[in-house]
Amino acid sequence: MTEQPARRLLLVHAHPDDESINNGATMAKYAAEGAHVTLVTCTLGERGEVIPPELAHLSGAALGQHRMGELKAAMHALGVADFRLLGGPGRFADSGMMGLPDNDDPGCFWQADVDEAAGLLLDVIREVRPQVLVTYDPNGGYGHPDHIQAHRVAMRAAELAAEAGCGVDRIYWNRVPRPVAEAAFARLDEALPGLPFDQAAAVDDVPGVVEDERIGVEIVADGTPYAAAKAAAMRAHATQIDVAEPYFALSNALAQPLFGTEYYEPVNAAAAAGVRRSDLFAGAEETP
């Protein structure tokens, strides 16, 4: 039997591309250091808006299959071999943006039974035995129904894992400190005339912006190979992301910063008061 790596990280995301935007540098760093990095994506993003005109014909199942190919390319860029669709490809459909009729589709992730979906994620936890789980905050970062549901499913799976004796030692939510976001947008405003984007997004358009004191861990990747890997992974999601380093835009064509440093709020194990760590595994038990 092959021995598992000592450090094991599980990330739960809603659609292909979310992982690269939020955690690309973190994933590349830990994969390069020999940790086992597992990504669970909850939908194929079949209802995403397509940016490149030459791919505008893609929609529904065809878009989902294409985005799965983009995810595979992104994971290659990050050095991550273990990536899965929750319950298998097509088990849960993209729910679309909040308030659309798509939300009522009985097969969409927003309509999924949380305990049922969490049970599928529990199977992954039992197999991988991660010490660290990363997902969104209760608002899903910015209110998308699939992101909110991914949070609910991940947190419920963590509860079930604890009851089953295979609990996750550290849980973190994706975050961006407000002062960091404000400084990055100030630089963006100065750079905007030279970028292929007409307008900038707003600070509060960035998912997970919170006050600085809530940040417990920062993974610094600026100027390292991990930042380059993150940008490459984001470029792989070409239907969804237009990258002009160190900025990017989604289908709304509003520019926003591409953060090389990634930030996390500890949920079930607060960092020491006044101390910001540089390792998601700090203090976690390295269980076999």
Image: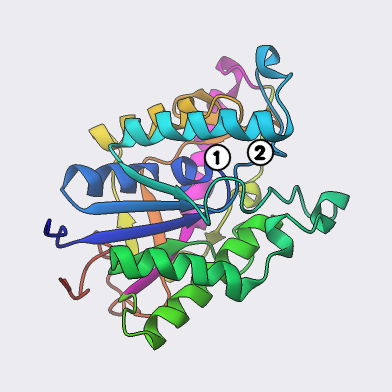
Q: What amino acid is at disc 1?
A: Phe
Q: Is residue 176 magenta?
A: yes
134 lies above or below 168: above
* Observer able to see residue 262: yes
95 lies above or below 70: below
Q: 2 or 184: nearer the eye?
A: 2
Circle 2 Cα neighbour tier, 10 Å, few/some/many (<14 / 14–19 / ≥20): some
Percent x, y for residue 77? Answer: 33, 30
Residue that carries the numbered disc 2 in the rendered image: 201
Predominant SS of the magenta segment: helix
The residue sitting at 27% across, 71% down in the picture is: 275
Q: Which residue ends up furthest to the right in the rendered image?
A: 101
Question: Which color scheme does this rendered protein use?
Answer: rainbow
Task: Indicate which disc residue 85 carries.
Answer: none
Q: What amino acid is at disc 2?
A: Ala
User: The N terminus appears in which quarter of the rendering?
Assistant: bottom left
Q: Examine the image and state in which quarter residue 194 appears.
A: top right
Q: Where does the magenta region start and end?
A: 170-197
Mark 2 in CB contact with mark 1 (< 8 angstroms): yes
Tag nearer the camera, 2 or 1: 2
User: The C terminus appears in which quarter of the rendering?
Assistant: bottom left
Q: Which residue ends up furthest to the top in the rendered image?
A: 54
The residue sitting at 47% across, 48% down in the picture is: 22
